[in-house]
Image (tube, grey):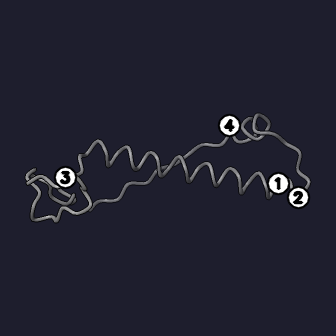
Amino acid sequence: MHNANPREHSHSQRTDNWEPLTKAHISPTSKITGAHLFISVLAYHLYGAISLSLSHAEDTRGVPMIRSEVATQSRLSALRDR
């Protein structure tokens, strides 16, 4: 007999192939998306912290001015052998 209340079903009565998610179920694409989301949220909070620090120091420069000042700097990446 079919029970009308789904909350009263126990896991042993399920007829689908439900199983808990494991690391094997996570696709490489979702890992990359999660990493991008993490970096974006981190950058958002970092920008907010820097902006707040500058405003407390009464620095009135905006993003375009700061970008033009750091545009002349260069980056260096170092790779090491494993």
- Mark 3–mark 1 CB contact (< 8 Å): no
Residue identifier under label 2? 57
Tag nearer the camera, 4 or 1: 1
Residue drawn at the location 65% of the way across and 43% of the way down: 73
For residue 39, side relative to residue 4 (left or right): right
Tag nearer the camera, 4 or 2: 2
* Residue type marked 4: Ala
Measured in 3D between alpha carbons, the distance from the residue under mark 3 to the one under mark 1, in whole angstroms, is 44 Å
Residue identifier under label 4? 71
- Mark 2–mark 3 CB contact (< 8 Å): no
Under circle 2, the secondary element is loop
Near mark 3 (Cα within 10 A), the count class, few <14, some 14-19 or many ≥20, is: few
Under circle 3, the secondary element is helix
| Residue 36, image quadrant | top left
Q: Is tag 4's residue or tag 2's residue first in the polypeptide sequence?
A: 2
Q: Which mark is residue 54?
A: 1
Measured in 3D between alpha carbons, the distance from the residue under mark 4 to the one under mark 1, in whole angstroms, is 19 Å
Measured in 3D between alpha carbons, the distance from the residue under mark 2 to the one under mark 3, in whole angstroms, is 48 Å
Classify 77 as above or below 22.
above
Measured in 3D between alpha carbons, the distance from the residue under mark 3 to the one under mark 4, in whole angstroms, is 42 Å
Residue drawn at the location 88% of the way across and 58% of the way down: 57
Q: Which mark is residue 81?
A: none
